[in-house]
Image (cartoon, coloured by chain):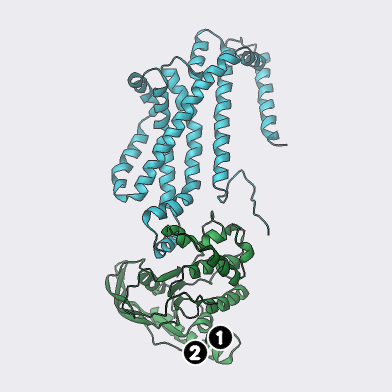
Chain colours: A cyan, B green
Amino acid sequence: MIARRPLLVLAGFLALWQAVVWLTGVPPFMLPPPVAVLRSLADHAGLLAYHALVTSGEILAGLLLGVIVGAASALAMALIPALQPWMLPPLVLGQAIPVFALAPILVLWLGYGMVSKVAMAVLIIYFPVTAALFDGLRRTDPGWLDLAHTMGASPLRTLWHLRLPAALPAFGSGLRIAAAVAPIAAVVGEWVGSGAGLGYLMLHANGRSQTALMFAAMVVLMAIALGLYVLIDRLLLHLTPWAPHSLALPNGRNP
Amino acid sequence: MADSSSSSSVGIDLRGITLGYDGGPLFAGLDFQLMPGQCTCLLGPSGVGKSSLLRVIAGLVPLDGGDIRCTDGRSIKKRIAWMGQSDGLLPWLTVEDNICLGARLRGERPARDRAARLLKDLDIAPLAGRLPATLSGGQRQRAALARTLMEDRPIVLMDEPFSALDAITRSRLQALAAEALAGRTVLLVTHDPLEALRLGHRIHVMTGTPATIEPALCPDGAPPRAVDDRDLLTLQATLLGRLAGAVERAA
């Protein structure tokens, strides 16, 4: 019942893929048929699992760190307005730097290990998270702020009990973007220089014309990215049940 | 129904209130009094500065000049409860938690039993655990009224609190509010002359730029007054006349 349409789309895509392979007679080292990719997934399950674990670790660590640093920056700017003219221009300027171009430098500075990939993810996540939360914090309903003021609330309590919950839906948009781009950051980092991870495995397989394995690694990466997005989406739905959500049905409780 | 724990009534004295707005003066040396324990209603054309005066008294807008004092000589700070144009209910809190918002924002322990009593008094006890999005407009406004009463302040400032409701719901809530707010010093900004006549001990019309406030109209009897009172309807005609004059002078 659930996800019947996505499954149909997936089946159609696989059929099209197989048809292209049959009709064009393209050699398997250029485009392996779906069955070959499936077989590769099964044959190299252990290998793929190991590298998937490495990449997942990088993604999760980057996401966690990026969200913490981004949220802290947004909260600091909201609580201490004097910080805004100091932090906003570098924030916007930093976004103008193509983070992918930084990947070689990060690997040079931080090495071939996990740290450079996590740093890459943090850098790429920081802006959308900070911007989304800060924007949400700035847009608190003025009527609520009036109310809080007449109730004698301190700025810190107003931030915690009123502005932060009110900004959660906006923060959620930033988190969803972060969840979508974090896997990209990790894989790009692995491409530039690494000894493990799905990005490394893809390059390695590519060099040996193991195209089916390359595709298998890509499928695993897609599964990780999709799983992460769904997880974040569910979490946000749970945290902000009052916020309108495009995928959820209106669900008002009746007396 | 009025809560007995509210401190004794206190009036407010505004002297020489001066406030600029977009370059032009909104108030220039305005004097105004709120009588202790009475409901004062403020009518006037849109944009004349009714809400601004309310915000000035609430301390939401800094004054350019003048002086606001309580008649007992103490500061007005922390003696005001505010009810704005929108109900201001937080969508992530249940009705009960919304009513206890003040305590939460001050880091105090909320008086849950008092909240329960207010919910019962306002006929919304069964809604205590519901989220605001599931309530009707009238129910939301009752919850907002309960939150205002929960603050238990001697002075209550209200900015067109019933304007978004349909006629029947509004009429019921007016009666309920008048009963619940009895004994407190209330300033009610409204654009509805009939509402002012039902609820106000004293009714003022605000006109002009910079704004001035005309002498009070004081209908007989205690609020809430019956809508079908013949005297009330005569007064409504008088009040409409004053308002029309104010609008013409503003144009």
Give coordinates of residue B242: x percent, y percent: 45, 86
- Of residues A241 and A138, the one nearer the viewer is A241
Answer left or right for A47 relative to A152: right
Toward which corner of the image does residue A223 lie, by quadrant?
top right
Q: Residue flagged by tag 2: what amino acid is it? A: Pro
Give coordinates of residue A26: x percent, y percent: 62, 11
Answer left or right for A224 relative to B153: right
Q: Residue flagged by tag 1: what amino acid is it? A: Arg
Please, which residue is most extreme toward the top here?
A208
The residue lying at 41 percent from left, 74 percent from top is B50
Q: Is residue B249 above or below residue B21?
A: below
The residue lying at 38 percent from left, 69 percent from top is B58
Q: Residues within 10 Å of mark 2 (few under 14, many from 20)?
A: some
Give the residue at mark 1: B225
Instruction: Evaluate if marks 2 and 1 touch, with contact meaning CB atoms under 8 Å apart.
Output: yes
Give coordinates of residue B199: x percent, y percent: 51, 81
Label 2 vs label 1: CA separation? 9 Å
Query: Mark 2 falls within which chain?
Result: B
Please, which residue is most extreme toward the right here?
A1
Secondary structure type for disc 1 = loop
Give the residue at mark 2: B219
Location of the N terminus of chain A by quadrant is: top right
Query: Mark 1 falls within which chain?
Result: B
Label tally: 2
Toward which corner of the image does residue B138 lie, by quadrant?
bottom right
Give coordinates of residue B234: x percent, y percent: 54, 91
The residue lying at 41 percent from left, 59 percent from top is B106
- Of residues B160 and B238, the one nearer the viewer is B160
